[in-house]
Image (cartoon, rainbow, N blue to C red):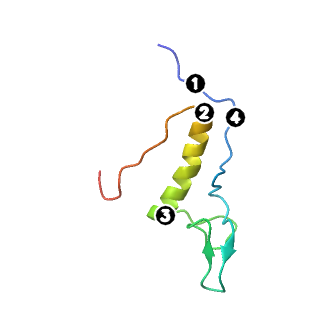
Amino acid sequence: MQAPYNPPVNIAPKNPDFLVSGNCTGSTGAYTCANPASALTDLPDLSSNPACTAYALAAINNARAQENVAPMVLPPIGTA
């Protein structure tokens, strides 16, 4: 049996980059950012919020596509 392919480098998160807030609009206490996990901090507060999960999953699937790997599909929340 052949070992699975191991990429030589990590792929940085992009499209979207879930490690940054992205463009934000609004006023103090009522900001809306491109990254739904962002609280205008240095790093977003990643959580199990469906919007946050979808945002991170988009970046993961972008990297998987660059490696010619099928997208990751998560089960709906509340199912196990």
Disc marking residue 9 = 4
Residue type at mark 4 is Val
Residue that lies at the very extreme toward the top in this rendered image:
1
Earlier in the chain: of badge 4 and badge 3, it is 4
x 61%, y 85%: residue: 29
Q: Which residue is mark 2?
A: 67
Give the CA separation, mark 2 to mark 1: 10 Å
Give the CA separation, mark 4 to mark 3: 28 Å
Viewed as shown, does residue 25 lie left or right of 56? right
Residue type at mark 3 is Ala
Q: Above or below — where is 7 with respect to 50?
A: above
Measuring from the top left, give residue 78's x and y in whole percent: 31, 59
Q: Which residue is mark 3?
A: 51
Earlier in the chain: of badge 4 and badge 2, it is 4
x 29%, y 50%: residue: 80
Earlier in the chain: of badge 2 and badge 1, it is 1
